[in-house]
Image (cartoon, rainbow, N blue to C red):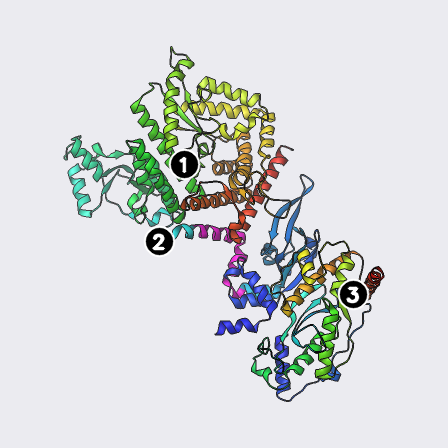
Amino acid sequence: MAAANQDTTRPQNTRAIMVFLQSHAPFSNMDDDHLAHFAEHATLRFYADGDVVLSAEDGVVNRFYVVKQGRIRGERHNEKADKTETTFEISQGECFPLAAIIGERPTRTLHRAAGDTFCLSIEQDAFVTLISESEPFRDFCLRGVSSLLDQVNQRIQTGAMASMGSSISLSTPLERYALRNPIVCNPDVPVRKAVARMHENNVGSIVITDDGRHPIGIFTLRDLRTMIAEETCSLDEPVGQIMTKNPCCLPVQADAFDAAMLMAEHHFAHLCVVDEHKRLIGMVSERDLFSLQRVDLVNLARTIGTATHLRTLVSLRTDVSRLVDAMLAHGADSGQVVKIITTLNDVTVRRVLELNIKKNDPGIAFTWLTFGSEGRQEQTLLTDQDNGILFQTPEGMTEEQVREKLLPFARAVNDELAQCGFTLCKGNIMASNPKLCLSDHEWDDWFIRFIDASTPQNLVYSSIFLDMRAVFGPTDSLNELLDKVLARIQKNALFQKMLAGNALQRKPPLTMFRNFRYVTDGKKNSLDLKRQGLAPFVEAVRVFALANGVKNANTLERMDKLVGKGIFDDKDANAWKDAYSLIQAIRMRSHQEMLERGEELTNFIDPNDLNPLDRRILRESFRQAQRLQQKLELTYQL
Amino acid sequence: MLQQLRQWIARRRTGITGTIAPENTPKPKTPGDQLLSECRLIVLDLETTGLHPSKDEVIAVGAVAINGGAIDLSDQFDLILRRPELDITQTVLIHGIGPEALTQGHETEDALLFLLEWMNGDPVLAYHSAFDQKFLEKTLKAELGYTQNHTWMDVADVLPAFFPDAKTGGKGLDHWADFFGLEVSARHHAASDALATAELTLIALNKAHKEGLKTLRELHDKLRYHRRLRNIHHN
């Protein structure tokens, strides 16, 4: 009764403004009374295209604005380049100038209308009233856009959570999961006594420590089973003889995700948690981490890693997709999820290789290389094969003779990987291609030609071959190769410049200032999140990384390294990492949705299918890509 | 404004009639040297039972004020008149005031008096203003015996005067609203149409400012000139 009554007691135009505000954050979370306060105290102004809305000369900011229609562009003068840069864009439903009105200072950015624009605004008095009375509004204003990013992440999680019904976050510090005061003993204790202690305490593992309480080994019930079954040791011998030495340790600051990744990679079920002096303070088991999950990462990785038949591997791929759902639900961010997918893909690739060696050993040691997104550890569910082989020619053999042995093997592996869901590479960038099954010397020659005699045509391969990683086999020869490649690129300014020019080919899908620019060759009204959204980041970051001797292939890790070297500003890099991760998150969520509908996976989305908040975040993310490209242009004077 | 209106109605109902009587309403202002960037303009829209001032009646009055070049939403007028003698089921309501306050007695007179006071004699703009002007003048005369002439300006003239080349595809409010991409919250609701008309007025005032037009008189003259020009073409 009250609510309905309230509604009709407000003038139509006040109600209309409230409805408008309600479809945008943070207003969507605010009470009606607070929205009415805003609407009743607002003035509506018009700015024609190019009109100045707010500038430093206006003095201390005393109004708070919301774009009702049109767009506002922020301009700053770049002293170095002596030109005006667009620093941000504010579109329908967005607010400005937050920092200035809260800091009670003039704005530092010229706000200009981009297109015919209407803005609602309230005076400082009304603004202060709202800040003090409305918690969502206060939260938004004080935390700025970062609280928006949180909202997007929250939404991604709740979507995936719906099917999970659990709320454990992978970002939770390990502390919360770790069992305090785990059962310990010293290495001289007989196995019998150690097992008795485990029995008394009803636990499945015991940590063996030295006098300084540093963990030196671990002994589990599984070890006991193996010991008895295989008669490797008697119960009276000291536990130090049979324990698994050098147990995996993580500092207490690490989070559940770190622990899960470490377990998945090494197939451990237990991890020691240590303090800064490496002294044992706790213990985490996979059961602690995943007690509530139906599909768990460690178990899945282990099942894949020990599968004995190809068909088992094929059937396990659906579990990977279910796991991605679960991971999103448990608060993993997109960077974490792509790493999980990559980890599981690595395990699958390794297992396929092992099974093939068992079946048909080529008899020659080799390193299995992956390129492109798998090389960068940025794979999603939609993935194809980009791989190659690096070998050292055994004495008395020619490279051609080695290839004769390796190529049929590689062919079989490529085919089996295809059955596991890794689509065959259309460009034939696969180990079974004789041009990509090369000795260390041949690879070196290949890169010399690639770098020193590059043409714009072969630069399209830079996104593949300059993001390289070993998945199987010895890594030393790859490291040597990488060192040489990096040194060569660092010396070759022309190549860098060509790479930079190439990286600028793919522009983020934004029009001058209006809206999303849709792809012309794909479906109507669709954005290609991979080529238009992620590629601008990946490619620009690659240029900076290679030019500055950063060895990592992962885009986020490259950015961290570039901050460390002082090439990227800390704040810029954080904004770029956020933007990149959010595009990735939206892409992965759309993959999961396509999978649910039984559709073929694509990287295309229609922004109109997104909610206004995601659309806005996506646009802001694309704008960050533009800024990164601007930095590239400036650095290489393109 | 609502607070003011509430107090004022309360005063009238308790018999303390205050200073406002029909003969004491604010004097209409003529277009002079008032600066467009500073003066107050009324933008108004009426809802009626039909198109003929002689037999149809006003149902609702929606109006907003432009103050110093901006629409001030704390200064608006949104009124639905109940006319029991007409067969209209619309509930009587001045927003912010309980229905019972207005169902008896002089509700229409009170509301119209308040409208005059709120208008403060400021120039009135409307879309196809001749229509609104005839209805309002008729109603004011019938209810209050009020006959003073206000300054009216037609936004349907203002827009083509400043945007002669606009390809709107028609002369209606909808055509211009579409042309500038305005979102009208509830078309044919008096207050909502008044706001849309006021938004179009802001666009025109922005253009006027850029063309060096500063005063109300200059605007008025430009409209007259434009109208004359159009009549020549029509003849």
Judging by the rendered image, the residue that carries numbered circle 3 is B35
Marks 3 and 2, how far apart in space? 64 Å
Upstream in sequence: badge 1 or badge 2: 2
B198 horizontally vs B35: left or right: left
- Horizontal side, residue A150 vs residue A117: left or right: left
**Residue beneath label 2, please?**
A165
Residue A342 marker: 1
Whether residues under marks 3 and 1 lie with C-beta atoms below 8 angstroms apart, the answer is no
Q: Amino acid at mark 3?
A: Leu
Q: Quadrant of residue B108?
A: bottom right
Please tell me whether mark 3 or mark 2 is closer to you in this view: 2
Classify 10 Å Cα crowding around label 3: few (below 14), some (14-19), many (20 and above).
some
Q: Is residue A134 magenta?
A: yes
> Residue A414, image x and y in percent?
39, 27
For this rendering, which residue is in front, B49 or A249?
B49
- Residue A81 drawn at (x, y percent): 67, 39
Magenta segment, principal secondary structure?
Answer: helix
Residue B11 tag number: none
Q: Quadrant of residue A318?
A: top left
The chain containing the residue under callout 3 comes to B
Q: Residue lying at the far top in this picture: please name it.
A: A396
For disc 2, the chain is A
